[in-house]
Image (spheres, rainbow, N blue to C red):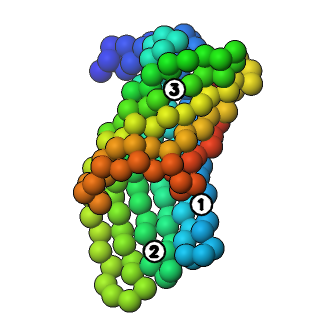
């Protein structure tokens, strides 16, 4: 048991010392006053950069939606593969390919609560702007893919699909 613990500790230190691990997250807030619709997302994440083009990571997040008296709570687990396809000076353009699960709890204005779990697969384009060696601002700008909750392939570039966040690179 001591050998296993020591091996895991050394591996963790080696990964962190190589300056390739990042932690952070994103938030999203969308409000449509015409339809009385509000969505709030908080999406903490952790990832590992293999080289200047390839990273892997995972989001474990929470979202709340209010739509004309109906409420939805969501918990999401969404691992991803990130490909950085362009660098324009310090600006990096990337696309995340992710597949994950979302647990929904629906609380209608009139009627009984219900819950379910759905899977999704998306491509999410984004932009990263490093402001120092350790700090980057990151944003996802929409998504294209399949959501089992709706059962359709869709593209969403509305304000509801835009997130803004910060990463700390070790």
On residue 71, the disc is 2
Q: In this view, does 44 lie to the left or right of 117?
A: right
Vertical relation: 81 (above or below) 116: above
* Image location of residue 77, percent across then percent down: 37, 45
**C-alpha distance separating marks 2 and 1:** 15 Å
- Is tag 2's residue or tag 1's residue first in the polypeptide sequence? 1
Q: In this view, does 97 lie to the left or right of 25?
A: left
* Image location of residue 162, percent across then percent down: 56, 48
- Is tag 3's residue or tag 1's residue first in the polypeptide sequence? 1
**C-alpha distance separating marks 2 and 3:** 33 Å
Q: Secondary structure under badge 2?
A: strand
Q: Which quadrant, please, contains the C terminus?
A: top right
Image quarter for residue 118?
bottom left
Q: Secondary structure under badge 3?
A: strand
- Is tag 2's residue or tag 3's residue first in the polypeptide sequence? 2
Q: Secondary structure under badge 1?
A: strand
* Image location of residue 156, percent across then percent down: 45, 50
Task: Out of 133 and 89, give the one closest to the viewer.
Answer: 89
| Residue depth check, mark 2 versus mark 3: number of the one nearer the observer | 3
* Image location of residue 36, percent across then percent down: 57, 76
Task: Out of 103 and 139, give the one closest to the viewer.
Answer: 139
Question: Which residue: 38% across, 32% down?
Answer: 97
Vertical relation: 11 (above or below) 93: above
On residue 30, the disc is 1
On residue 94, the disc is 3
Question: Which residue: 65% across, 17% down?
Answer: 88
Residue most toward the right? Answer: 131
Q: Which quadrant, please, contains the N terminus?
A: top left
Question: Which residue: 33% across, 14% down?
Answer: 3
**C-alpha distance separating marks 3 and 1:** 23 Å
| Residue depth check, mark 2 versus mark 1: number of the one nearer the observer | 1
């Amino acid at each position: 048991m001591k050998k296993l613990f020591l091996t895991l500790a050394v591996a963790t230190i080696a990964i962190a010392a190589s300056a390739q691990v990042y932690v952070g997250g994103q938030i999203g807030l969308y409000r449509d006053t015409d339809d009385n619709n509000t969505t709030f997302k908080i999406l903490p994440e952790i990832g590992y950069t293999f080289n200047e083009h390839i990273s892997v990571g995972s989001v474990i997040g929470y979202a709340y939606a209010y739509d004309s008296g109906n409420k939805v709570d969501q918990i999401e687990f969404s691992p991803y593969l990130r490909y950085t396809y362009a660098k324009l000076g310090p600006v990096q353009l990337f696309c995340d390919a992710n597949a994950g699960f979302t647990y929904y709890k629906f609380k209608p204005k009139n009627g009984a609560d219900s819950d379910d779990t759905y899977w999704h697969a998306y491509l999410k384009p984004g932009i990263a702007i490093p402001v120092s060696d350790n700090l980057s601002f990151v944003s996802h700008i929409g998504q294209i893919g399949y959501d089992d909750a709706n059962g359709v392939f869709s593209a969403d570039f509305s304000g509801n699909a835009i997130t803004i966040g910060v990463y700390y690179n070790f």
